[in-house]
């Protein structure tokens, strides 16, 4: 019985530690450019020692990606834009990787088709440090445009 209780306590503490590791937080903002167009901004704030991968990573880590929900209220204009990422050679996967540290703001331009618009979707990213990577994470977002 004591072993069972010890096992349960160890499992719960491990799960609690995994939930505490949230090295990336996301925030959102929109800005109207004119009556027909707006931009939405998706900002990742990344803790020191961690990084997320750029949108153009292949053959290794999971790239950051954005999937916008179809809507009759707006239409995407072009692709999601990101600043120039950092780059370095990764010895583990034996290739050059591109990534962001500290913070990064992604931008998506939209055409407004209705007066009230909420841009929604899901973003996916993978966060790593020099020592470990956390599993890829999906985050749902809703960004009102007014």
Image (spheres, rainbow, N blue to C red):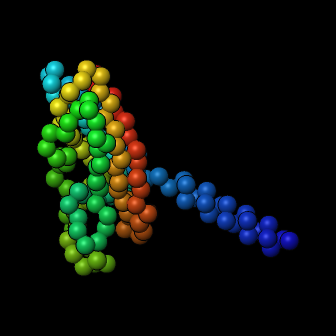
The residue sitting at 41% across, 48% down in the picture is: 139
Q: Nearer the viewer, residue 74 or 5?
A: 74
Q: Is residue 16 left or right of residue 24?
A: right
Give how far across and how far down residue 81 sits, in percent.
17, 46
State the image quarter where residue 113 is shown: top left
Q: Count of labels shown?
A: 0
Give how far across and how far down residue 86 sits, in percent.
20, 59
Instruction: Please say if 75 is above or below 91.
Output: above
Q: Quarter of the image containing the C terminus?
A: top left
Q: Is residue 115 visible?
A: yes
Q: Quarter of the image containing the N terminus?
A: bottom right
Q: Nearer the viewer, residue 142 or 112?
A: 112
The residue sitting at 29% across, 44% down in the picture is: 68
The residue sitting at 73% across, 65% down in the picture is: 8
Q: Nearer the viewer, residue 15 or 141?
A: 141
Q: Is residue 49 visible?
A: no
Instruction: Please say if 69 is above or below 87.
Output: above
Give how far across and how far down residue 136 sits, in percent.
40, 60
Question: Which residue of the protein is positioned furthest toward the front in this rendering?
Answer: 72
Instruction: Please say if 32 is above or below 131.
Output: above
Q: Is residue 87 left or right of residue 23?
A: left
The residue sitting at 20% across, 56% down in the picture is: 85
Q: Is residue 109 left or right of residue 124?
A: left
State the image quarter where residue 72 is shown: top left
Give how far across and how far down residue 62 sits, in percent.
32, 64
């Amino acid at each position: 019985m004591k072993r069972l209780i010890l096992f349960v306590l160890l499992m719960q503490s491990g799960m609690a530690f995994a939930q505490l590791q949230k090295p990336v937080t996301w925030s959102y903002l929109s800005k109207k450019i004119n009556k027909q167009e707006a931009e939405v901004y998706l900002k990742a704030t990344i803790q020191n020692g961690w990084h997320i991968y750029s949108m153009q990573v292949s053959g290794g880590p999971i790239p950051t990606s954005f999937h916008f929900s179809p809507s009759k209220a707006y239409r995407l204009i072009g692709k999601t834009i990101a600043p120039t990422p950092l780059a370095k050679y990764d010895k583990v996967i034996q290739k050059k990787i591109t990534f962001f540290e500290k913070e990064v703001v992604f931008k998506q331009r939209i055409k407004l088709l209705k007066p009230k618009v909420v841009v929604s979707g899901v973003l996916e990213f993978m966060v790593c440090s020099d020592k470990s990577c956390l599993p890829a994470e999906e985050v749902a977002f809703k960004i009102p445009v007014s």
